[in-house]
Structure formats: C-alpha cells, structure tokens
Image: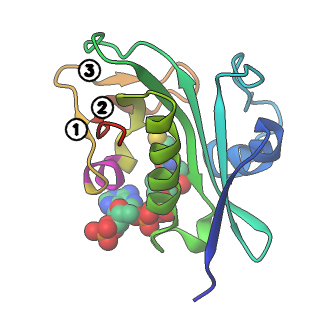
C-alpha cells in the first residue's frame, strides 16, 4: 500500500479538494475561511504519491460549551472519494493533533456532519448533547463534537 505523506500546507492548496468533497464541486460555494491566512491557523494535506487526498484545517477557537481548555476548531475535514475508508483521514488527524499539542492545544472541537459522526467516534471524539443543528453553509444536519488532547511531553 502506498504510504500517506502528511504535511502542513497553505490553505489554498486544499480549496479544490474542499470544494469537490464537501461542496458538490459547486463553483458558487465558498471553500475558504476568513482565518485561513492567519499565522495561528494550521492546514494539513495528506498526499499519496504527490496527489492530495486528505484535507484538514485547524483554527484557534473557544469550544462551545467547553470553554476552559485551549481549543482549536477543525474545519474542512475531507478525504477524496476513491480512498475514503482507507485510514488516511485518521492518519492526518493523528499527525495534526501531535503538532497542535506541541503548540499548546488541549482540545479540538468541530461542527461535524451527522453522516461523518462514525468517523469521529472511531477516532476518539464525543458528541455534545443538545448541539444538533443545520449547517448555515450546507443546510445539512450537524452536531458539535469535542476531543480532549493528551498533555504535551
Ligand atoms: C468523514 C471522512 C473525512 C473520513 O475520512 P476517511 O479517510 O474516509 O476515514 P478513515 O478511513 O481514516 O476512517 C477511520 C475510522 O473511521 C471509520 N469511519 C470513517 N468514515 C465513517 C463513516 N462515515 N461512518 C462510520 N464510520 C466511519 C472507519 O471505518 C475507521 O474505523 P476503524 O478505525 O474502526 O477501521 C471522509 O469519509 C469524508 O471526507 N467524507 C465526506 C466528507 C465529510 O463528511 N467530511 C466531514 C465533514 S465534518
């Protein structure tokens, strides 16, 4: 099996994959975030033989309903269609989490698509009861999820 290479990238590298996997390839939908270019934002790509197949972006942000920990918001988590279910999304999250811990992060949070909750539960996240809502961007059902990170060594 080809090894996945996970590395930090500029946000713009991820826009095409974000659009295709998360926005039905609709050219009229936004796939950026106002914080994309912030020094404190972190964007990761997962690459197979140089081809981008996973995107994940993290922004410093107070977690809803859990404000006491230093938190980052995960947005635009996506694995390209033909390689979903291969463990690559989980690998990118693991590499990103280690880097975020080194930067002082204690917790991750996200607005998760309900159709992806199985992925998040399998990778150690938990749902926030009563946080079910429709995304203002896609109108799809979402739930707030949290994941506590281990302390830095
Ligand atoms: C959700 C998504 C990011 C997961 O990435 P992935 O690379 O396919 O996931 P992985 O292969 O790393 O899966 C890791 C684990 O989660 C499980 N999993 C993945 N997607 C799942 C799903 N939709 N439902 C249930 N379990 C799922 C896998 O079976 C695996 O479990 P295991 O470790 O017990 O074998 C990807 O499927 C995707 O891009 N989906 C469409 C876009 C989307 O919904 N993004 C999330 C927006 S919040």
In x, y percent, where is residue 12?
Answer: 82, 38
**For residue 105, side relative to residue 46 (left or right):** left
Distance between mark 2 and mark 1 Cα atoms: 5 Å
Q: Is residue 118 magenta?
A: yes
Q: Is residue 82 left or right of residue 87?
A: right
Foreground disc of the pair 2, 3: 2
Ligand 1 positioned in quadrant: bottom left
Circle 1 residue: 126
Q: Residue 143 appears at what percent x and percent y?
A: 32, 30
Relative vertical location of residue 118 with respect to residue 9 in this rendering, above or below: below
Task: Estimate how packed mark 1 is, as few (under 14), some (14 to 19) or many (20 or more) residues with alpha carbons within 10 Å.
Answer: some
The residue under label 2 is 146
* Above/below status of 19 relative to 59: below
Residue span colored magenta: 117-121
- Residue 131: image tag: 3
Secondary structure found at label 2: strand
Sequence-first disc among 2 and 1:
1
Residue 21 or 39: which is nearer the viewer?
Answer: 39
Left or right of 90 on screen, residue 42: right
Upstream in the sequence, badge 2 or badge 3?
3
Mark 3 or mark 1, earlier in chain: 1
Quadrant occupied by the C terminus: top left
Spatial CA span between label 2 and label 3: 11 Å
Cβ–Cβ under 8 Å for marks 2 and 1? yes
What SS does tag 3 mark? loop
Residue sticking out furthest to the bottom = 1
**Residue 114, quarter of picture:** top left
Above or below 81: residue 143: above
| Secondary structure found at label 1 | strand
Q: Which mark is residue 59?
A: none
């Amino acid at each position: 099996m080809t090894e996945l290479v996970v590395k930090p990238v500029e946000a713009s590298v991820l826009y095409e994959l974000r659009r295709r996997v998360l926005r039905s390839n609709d050219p009229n939908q936004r796939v950026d975030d106002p914080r994309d270019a912030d020094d404190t934002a972190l964007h990761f790509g997962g690459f197979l033989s140089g081809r981008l197949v996973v995107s994940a972006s993290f922004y410093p942000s107070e977690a809803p309903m859990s404000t006491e920990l230093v938190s980052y918001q995960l947005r635009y988590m996506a694995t390209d269609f033909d390689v979903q279910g291969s463990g690559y999304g989980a690998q990118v999250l693991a590499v990103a989490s280690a880097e975020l811990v080194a930067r002082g992060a204690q917790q991750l949070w996200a607005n998760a698509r309900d159709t992806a909750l199985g992925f998040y539960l399998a990778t150690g996240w938990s749902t926030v009861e009563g946080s079910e809502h429709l995304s203002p961007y896609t109108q799809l059902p979402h739930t707030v999820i949290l994941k506590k990170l281990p302390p830095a060594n």
